[in-house]
């Protein structure tokens, strides 16, 4: 996946590691991502990791957490 600089405005996108920075990537894409980026998340990360990040996140807005909690229930 080639990340958009506008999605990760506060870091050098060349230094993002999809494993080490998984929580950061998931939070940003769930909060600000486009459809194609969300589809990539679903195919790249496990559903259990996505759920875990949503539950533990301190940076997602409450309405974003509510939406993804509902979607990830199934």
Image (spheres, grey):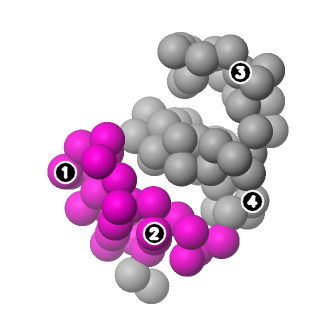
Mark 2 burial class by Cα count in 10 Å: few <14, some 14-19, many 20+: few
Q: Position of residue 40 (x, y in %)?
A: 70, 51
The answer to if 50 sits in the magenta stretch is yes
N-terminal of the pair, mark 4 or mark 2, is: 4
> Is residue 35 at least partly visible in the picture?
no
Pick the residue in front: 48 or 41.
48
Inter-mark Cα distance, 3 to 1? 26 Å
Position of residue 2 measured from the top left corner of the image (x, y, whole percent): 79, 30
Mark 3 lies on residue: 13
- Quadrant placement of the N terminus: top right
Residue range of the region highlighted in magenta in the rendering: 46-72
The answer to whether mark 2 and mark 1 are in CB contact below 8 A is: no
Q: Which numbered disc covers residue 52?
A: 2
* Residue corresponding to mark 1: 62
Label 4 to label 2: alpha-carbon separation: 15 Å
Measure how far apart labels 2 and 1 are at the Cα level: 15 Å
What is the x, y in percent for residue 55? 34, 66
> As displayed, is residue 32 above or below residue 54?
above
Please tell me whether mark 4 or mark 2 is closer to you in this view.
2
Q: Earlier in the sequence, mark 3 or mark 1?
A: 3
Q: Are marks 3 and 1 in contact (CB under 8 Å)?
A: no
Where 5 sits versus 20, above or below?
A: above
- Which residue, given by chain and number where applicable, does mark 4 sit on? 44
Secondary structure under tag 1 reads helix
């Amino acid at each position: 996946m080639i990340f958009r600089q506008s999605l990760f405005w506060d870091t050098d996108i060349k230094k993002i590691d999809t494993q080490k920075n998984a929580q950061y990537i998931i939070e940003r894409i769930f909060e600000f991502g486009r459809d194609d980026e969300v589809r990539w998340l679903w195919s790249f990360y496990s559903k259990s990791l996505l759920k875990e990040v949503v539950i533990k996140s301190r940076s997602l807005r409450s309405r974003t957490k509510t939406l993804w909690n509902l979607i990830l229930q199934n």
